[in-house]
Image (spheres, helix red, strand yellow):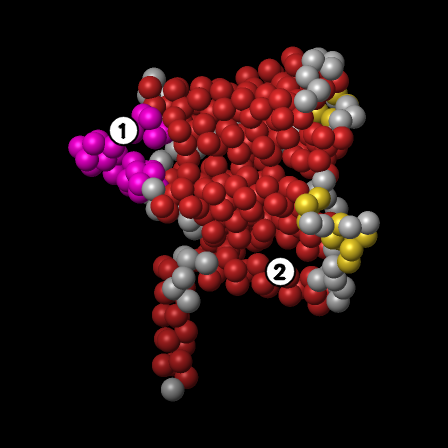
Amino acid sequence: MQSRLFWPIFVLLLLLAFNLINDPSFFAIEIKQGRLFGSVIDILNRAAPIALLALGMTLVIATGGIDLSVGAVIAISGAVCAYLIQNEIVTSTPLIILAGIGVALIAGLWNGILVSILGIQPIIATLILMVAGRGIAQLITGGQILTFDHVGFEFIGGGTLFGIPFSIVLVVLTYGVTFLVLRKTALGLFIASIGANPTASYFAGIREPQIKILVYMFSGLCAGLAGMILTSDIQGADANNAGLWSELDAILAVVVGGTALTGGRYYIGPTLIGVLILQTMTTTILTNGLPVQFTHIVKAAVVILVMLIMSPQFRGELNRLRTNKTKEII
């Protein structure tokens, strides 16, 4: 019960159990035309973009920062890819992907420079790109929805690998590689040290500016990948709505996963569970016929409940009240 994963997994299992009771076929998975279909697969597929955002956000928050610009980076990355395809400037799938990743890395580099070199507060630095980035994406698309037809690029969001949606495979690979890098190198320790005690990290010889720039670039990379998933899935780039408010879902997932916004310790596994909790809630609300307007209200209420359950102080107070009640009965 002391495991960091216990309470997020417990809440996720409760949500899954509710769906199973409500719909006995909830866990049913079938294969159609070589592709897996089912409610669980749909949850995993729809959660993929936020899972990528939350991964980058976890490391940013671990350094004591925040990245409010990931939604705008989604829009920019998708707009660039769609523009190149529609105007036939680039037809090679690898080059289109490199272009989407390139602009996302530049966006992350911009945030990193503002935060670590110029010393601007992370919330302000990333808010700048959150506002300006959306405008940049709209300039690229001309304020219109750019549609395209490109089989190779569409594979990112709509293709399958061994019957599994490629977006899910991409998330698993990204999380796996990130986990190995953070655990097998000193980078993970450096990130946690900077967030926990910047002064001590400085005297220990850790290069804080370089680490922060790297982390913000990684957050940009994750947002760029998420943008390409969303863009290729709908075969179009909508600069006005692509990734809108997705940064808030990413932050919620990180918090539900147990990573403190003050920085320091971070938890990649629980963050992924947090993403699945949020997406399962959304799917549950929609499949039960509730108006979509209720999604954010219910999501906020459940997040508050989850945070209370995960709070040692809250659980301790409940145990104290239960003990006092038992003594009164005796």
**Which of these two is toward me, 149 or 317?**
149
Residue 196 at what x, y percent from top left? Answer: 29, 41
Q: Which residue is mark 2?
A: 15
Q: Main secondary structure of the magenta part?
A: helix
Q: Residue furthest right?
A: 33
Identify the residue at image location x=46%, y=58%. 5
Kind of residue at disc 2:
Leu
Q: Nearer the viewer, mark 2 or mark 1?
A: 1
Q: Is residue 321 above or below residue 195?
A: below
**Which of these two is toward me, 247 or 328?**
247
Identify the residue at image location x=74%, y=53%. 36
Residue 214 position by quadrant:
top left
> Is residue 160 covered in magenta?
no
**Which stretch did the figure color magenta?**
186-212
Under circle 2, the secondary element is helix
Q: Residue furthest left?
A: 203
Kind of residue at disc 1:
Arg
Residue 238 position by quadrant:
top right
> Is residue 208 covered in magenta?
yes
Q: CA distance from mark 2 to mark 1?
A: 43 Å
Residue 158 at what x, y percent from top left? Answer: 73, 39
Residue 259, visible in the rendered structure? no
Identify the residue at image location x=82%, y=49%. 33
- Screen quadrant of the N terminus: bottom left
Q: Which residue is mark 1?
A: 207
Residue 224 at what x, y percent from top left? Answer: 57, 29
